Image: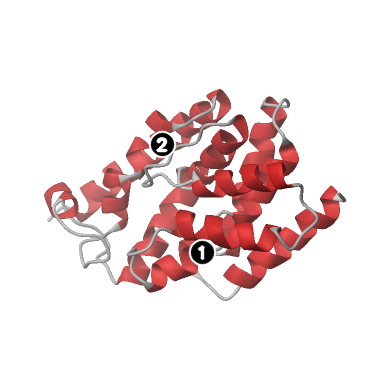
Amino acid sequence: MDEQKELISASRFAAEKLGGTGGCHDFDHTKRVLQNAQMLLREIPQADAFCVCMAVWLHDIARPLEDEQSGKCCHAQLGAQLANSYLLTRDIPDKLRERIVSAVLRHRFRGKIYPVSLEEKIVFDADKLDSLGAVGIGRAFLFAGKCGARLHNTRDEALNSPAYSLQDTAYREYLVKLSKLPEVMQTLPGARIAVERAKFMSEFFSRLDEETRL
């Protein structure tokens, strides 16, 4: 198996699936997740870097389908199926294919299928790190804008409103998901970086709340 050839093929496959999409889950997001994964791998050299990077390239290939259905399907579960079909066409040993597919399946924060292997945990953390810090703030506003949500709202409005609604603001995403990410990180370096990035987000939303208070 030529690992470099397979990585290039997977990146092209992901670009094909995501290249026409914009917003916070586009191909740029996948490339940033890969950078995060490589950063974590430098501190966790015992992990299978090829497995991690293949899973990263494929982790969001079904995200456009979830967005089209306003969250009614799970992109991790559907993505695992698509990834498996794709990998069956490649020169990937069965056991390795299964590990890559499992990492795709288990990368989602809102899913109930949690990462188990070290490689799955690195993919999970790399993905979550892109939801934190300055990039995380930008992505939260991109998602809110795509939903047609308000710029900002109160804590009560945010927490008592459904997803994909007028009240599905960046602040709601922060309260419901992003503020909780440091607690669920799976690796020590991932957790360390997440805490620092989450601190910046907390300060930002506190300032936004002050400036928009009526």
Give the secondary structure at mark 2.
helix
* Picture coordinates of residue 58, whole percent (x, y): 62, 56
Residue corresponding to mark 2: 198
Q: Residue at x 55, y 34 (%)?
A: 121
The one nearer the camera, 119 or 133, is 119
Quarter of the picture containing the C terminus is bottom left
* Picture coordinates of residue 128, whole percent (x, y): 48, 43
Q: Residue at x 69, y 33 (%)?
A: 41
Three-letter code, disc 2: Ala
Q: Given the current orientation, which residue lies at the most extreme right position?
A: 2
Q: Does residue 60 show up?
A: no
Q: Residues within 10 Å of mark 1 (few under 14, many from 20)?
A: many
Q: Residue at x 86, y 49 (%)?
A: 1
Give the vertical position of 119 relative to 171 (above or below): above
* Residue 12 placement, left or right of 160: right
Q: Say which mark, if any, is on residue 116.
A: none
Give the vertical position of 121 relative to 204 (above or below): above
The one nearer the camera, 94 or 156, is 94
Q: CA distance from mark 1 to mark 2?
A: 27 Å
The one nearer the camera, 175 or 45, is 45
Q: Say which mark, if any, is on residue 62.
A: 1
Three-letter code, disc 1: Ala
